[in-house]
Image: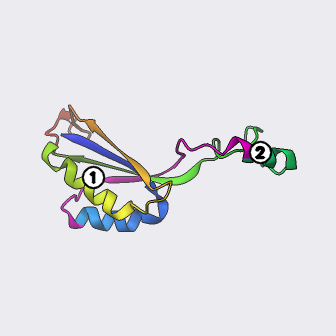
């Protein structure tokens, strides 16, 4: 079993949810979160902006740049059999790919154990 985690644009939640369900992935979680990618603002442009004195501050009082600004995202998580990982990834990509920065990131992690909270016992993974 694998966990497929996808950090995606907030605007794509309903489309992603509907596409996963239509593809047979009925159980998943979705949570609001904040995130950012690795792209940094061009140093030359940053200097021009800083020289103008127009950069906003973060809650911690630091100068806000593209590297410190966090963007609202949605984190999807679903547990799938190994043979369905590629299906889940393909569905998520098909719905969320716009060819623009910020489309998201998908991570695939191994799942080794599962427990039932209600019963307090080790459970079948799926």
Report the Cα–Cα distance between label 1 and label 2.
37 Å
Q: Please, is residue 37 above or below residue 101 in the view?
A: above
Image x and y of residue 67, in percent: 63, 42
Mark 2 sits on what residue? 57
- Confirm whether residue 118 shows in the render: no
Residue at horizontal 24 percent and vertical 54 percent from the top: 88
Residue 112 shown left or right of residue 49 in the figure: left
Instruction: Give the total of numbered labels.
Output: 2
Lateral position of residue 95 relative to residue 82, left or right: right
Residue 70 in view of the camera: yes
Q: State the extent of the magenta-drawn residues as a range.
A: 22-44
Q: Is residue 117 magenta?
A: no
Name the secondary structure under disc 1.
Answer: helix
- Residue depicted at x 61% and y 43%: 40
Precedes in sequence: disc 1 or disc 2: 2
Q: Label 1: few (<14), some or many (≥20) within 10 Å?
A: some
Q: Which residue is labeled 1 in the image?
A: 89
């Amino acid at each position: 079993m694998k966990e497929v985690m996808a950090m995606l644009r907030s605007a794509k939640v309903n489309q992603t949810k509907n596409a996963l369900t239509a593809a047979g992935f009925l159980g998943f979680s979705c949570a609001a979160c904040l995130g950012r990618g690795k792209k940094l603002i061009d140093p030359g442009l940053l200097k021009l902006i800083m020289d103008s004195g127009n950069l906003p501050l973060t809650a911690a009082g630091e100068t806000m740049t593209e590297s410190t600004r966090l963007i609202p995202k949605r984190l999807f998580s679903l547990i799938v059999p190994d043979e369905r990982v590629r299906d889940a990834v393909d569905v998520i990509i098909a719905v969320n790919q716009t060819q623009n920065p910020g489309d998201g990131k998908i991570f695939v992690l191994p799942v080794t154990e599962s427990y039932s909270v209600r019963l307090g016992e080790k459970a079948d993974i799926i």
